[in-house]
Amino acid sequence: MPSTASPPPPVPGPIPCPDAHTRPFWQAAARGVLSLPRCGCDPQLLYPPPPRCPRCLDETFEWVELSGRGRLWSWTEIAVPWFPGAPVPSVVAQVAPDEQAGLLLLAADPLGRVRS
């Protein structure tokens, strides 16, 4: 006898689990903005967002909105779903933001909007 059960719904993609240290990062990301913390003791941006400054151990940060512009160091196009239901192809890129030389960010772009 054939099964009348419906197929299971697609599994959602990875869902961030913000904590007190990363919540501003994820709130900005939800608005389509890249924002990183900076401590008052040092002009360097910190990524990933830490619980405290690695230099002075202060837990208070200024959050800086980045322009979204930078230098593309490397990228790859993924042709298979990297989680169930992920769109393909998708792009993963390593980018140095204009705001800070030497800082490399890893960005996943499942919609293929990375532009050089």
Image (tube, rainbow, N blue to C red):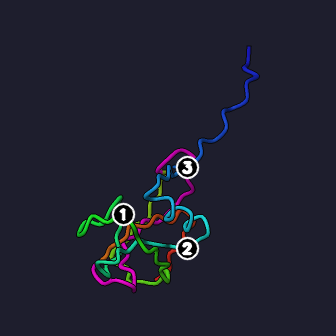
Which residue does the image show at 34% across and 70% down from the upper left? Answer: 46
Q: Which mark is residue 87?
A: none
In the rendered view, would you say 8 is above or below 79?
A: above
From the top left corner, tell me how far across and down residue 14 is, in percent. 51, 49
Residue range in magenta is 82-102
Q: Earlier in the sequence, mark 3 or mark 2?
A: 3
Q: Earlier in the sequence, mark 3 or mark 1?
A: 3
Q: Which mark is residue 13?
A: 3
Question: Is residue 101 shown left or right of residue 35?
Answer: left
Distance, label 3 to label 2, CA atoms, is 20 Å
Task: Identify the residue under disc 1.
Answer: 59
Q: What secondary structure is the magenta-colored segment mainly?
A: loop
Which residue does the image show at 49% across and 47% down from the upper left? Answer: 83
> Which numbered disc, 3 or 1, marks the residue closer to the eye?
1
Q: Amino acid at mark 3?
A: Gly
Q: Secondary structure at mark 3?
A: loop
Q: Secondary structure at mark 1?
A: loop
Does residue 86 belong to the magenta stretch?
yes
**Residues under numbered marks 1 and 2 in contact, where contact means CB atoms less than 8 Å apart:** no
Task: Identify the residue under disc 2.
Answer: 33
Viewer-proximal residue among 58 and 13:
58
> Which numbered disc, 1 or 2, marks the residue closer to the eye?
1
Q: Amino acid at mark 1?
A: Glu
Q: Residue furthest left?
A: 55
Which residue does the image show at 32% across and 73% down from the upper left? Answer: 104
Which residue does the image show at 46% across and 55% down from the upper left? Answer: 20
Viewer-proximal residue among 98 and 60:
60
From the top left corner, tell me how far across and down residue 23 is, in percent. 50, 59
